[in-house]
């Protein structure tokens, strides 16, 4: 998810997106622990997306 897309979301939309991304990350991480996923770089991309959304959410709530 691009930074420009994240900035345009409201605080409630960011919270929904954050919970969705965290669930996806947890599912993908569990799948990778059981058997290696095809593209392990997906984990890094999701983790960074979670960080971007969390940072923007913190900015909007201040």
Image (tube, rainbow, N blue to C red):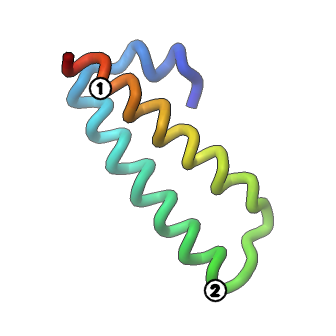
Q: Is 24 placed left or right of 19 in the picture? A: right
Viewport quadrant of the N terminus:
top right
- Above or below for 26 versus 48: below
Residue placed furthest toward the bottom: 34
Residue that numbered label 1 is attached to: 58
State left or right for residue 61 relative to residue 28. left
Distance of mark 2 from mark 1, alpha carbons?
34 Å
Question: Which numbered disc, 2 or 1, marks the residue closer to the eye?
Answer: 1
Would you identify the image quadrant in which residue 38 lies?
bottom right
Give residue 8's position: percent from left, percent from top.
40, 13
Give the residue displayed 38% in from the left and 50% down from the top: 20
Return the x and y of residue 18 as percentages of the image width and height.
Answer: 36, 42
- Residue 60 location (% of width, % of height): 26, 17
Position above or below: 17 against 33: above
* Residue at screen point 63% across, 86% down: 34
Answer with left or right where residue 39 lies relative to residue 18.
right
- Residue at 51% across, 58% down: 25
Mark 2 and mark 1 lie on one chain; the one further toward the N terminus is: 2
Image x and y of residue 62, in percent: 20, 16
**Residue drawn at 58 percent across, 24 percent down:** 2
Disc 2: CA contacts within 10 A as few (<14), some (14-19) or many (>=20): few
Q: Nearer the viewer, residue 16 or 55?
A: 55
CB-based contact (under 8 Å), mark 2 and mark 1: no
Numbered tag placed on residue 19 in the rendering: none
Residue at disc 2, secondary structure: helix
Question: Of helix, strand and loop, which one carries label 1?
Answer: helix
Residue 34: which disc? 2
Q: Quadrant of residue 61?
A: top left
How packed mark 1 is, by other alpha carbons closer than 10 Å (few <14, some 14-19, many 20 or more), is few
Instruction: Count the numbered circles shown.
Output: 2
């Amino acid at each position: 998810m691009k930074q420009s897309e994240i900035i345009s979301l409201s605080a409630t939309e960011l919270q929904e997106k954050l919970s969705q991304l965290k669930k996806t990350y947890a599912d993908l991480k569990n799948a990778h622990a059981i058997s290696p996923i095809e593209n392990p770089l997906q984990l890094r991309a999701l983790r960074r997306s979670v960080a971007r959304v969390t940072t923007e959410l913190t900015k909007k709530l201040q």
